[in-house]
């Protein structure tokens, strides 16, 4: 079944549906306002009777999808989410502008079709050594011990002159 596009004149929404060829001639209700919508011309892709090859099976000279490039694990910072790592890999391969354009196009399409944007992943840990409770406890104990030593070494009432 082919993929067709319809556009609602009332709410200015463009939507897609997989329908049989004979059913595509009829108007379809808009998913937002339920009014009948007219079919519009959209991009078409023709394969000579065979399915498109998956990315892994494409010609050796063909460029891989810019959003699927990966950074070696040693070069990936621990704070990086998958999106940040893919962007870094694209820039390292000299395809950074292509990555940014591709992602902007995807964001615009999601906004146009009313799909919610995924929030960035949260970072599960801090990078300060004091973020680790065990390290914090050891350092606090050492600071107290050092403070006791310095107060025991100094006679009471002695003042320092600078």
Image (cartoon, rainbow, N blue to C red):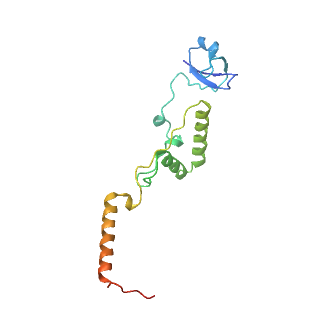
Residue 3 position by quadrant: top right
At horizontal 54% and vertical 37% (from top left) the residue drawn is 117
User: 81 above or below 144?
Assistant: above
User: 112 above or below 98?
Assistant: above
**Would you say 146 lies left or right of 88 here?**
left
User: Where in the figure is residue 71, as x and y percent of width and height?
Assistant: 46, 50
At horizontal 49% and vertical 31% (from top left) the residue drawn is 53
User: Where in the figure is residue 33, as x and y percent of width and height?
Assistant: 63, 20
At horizontal 50% and vertical 49% (from top left) the residue drawn is 89
**Would you say 19 lies left or right of 12 here?**
left
User: Where in the figure is residue 69, as x and y percent of width and height?
Assistant: 49, 45
At horizontal 56% and vertical 14% (from top left) the residue drawn is 20
Q: Quick one: 24 or 33, which is closer to the camera?
A: 33
Q: Quick one: 29 or 62, which is closer to the camera?
A: 29
Residue 127 position by quadrant: bottom left
Task: Indicate the quadrant containing the N terminus: top left, top right, bottom left or bottom right.
Answer: top right
User: 79 above or below 113?
Assistant: below
User: Where in the figure is residue 79, as x and y percent of width and height?
Assistant: 45, 52
Residue that extends furthest to the front in the rendered view of this protein? 157
């Amino acid at each position: 079944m082919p993929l067709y596009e319809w556009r609602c004149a009332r709410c200015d929404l463009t939507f897609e549906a997989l329908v049989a060829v004979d059913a595509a001639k009829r108007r379809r209700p808009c998913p937002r306002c339920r009014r009948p919508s007219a079919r519009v011309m959209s991009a078409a892709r023709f394969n000579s009777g065979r399915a498109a090859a998956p990315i892994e099976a494409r010609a050796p000279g063909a460029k891989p999808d810019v959003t699927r490039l990966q950074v070696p694990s040693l070069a990936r910072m621990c704070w990086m989410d998958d999106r940040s790592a893919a962007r870094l890999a694209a820039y390292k391969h000299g395809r950074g502008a292509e990555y940014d354009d591709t992602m902007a196009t995807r964001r615009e399409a999601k906004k146009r079709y009313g799909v919610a944007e995924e929030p960035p992943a949260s970072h599960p840990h801090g990078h300060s050594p004091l973020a680790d409770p065990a390290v914090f406890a050891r350092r606090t104990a050492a600071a107290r011990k050092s403070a006791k030593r310095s107060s025991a070494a100094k006679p009471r009432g002695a003042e320092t002159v600078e």
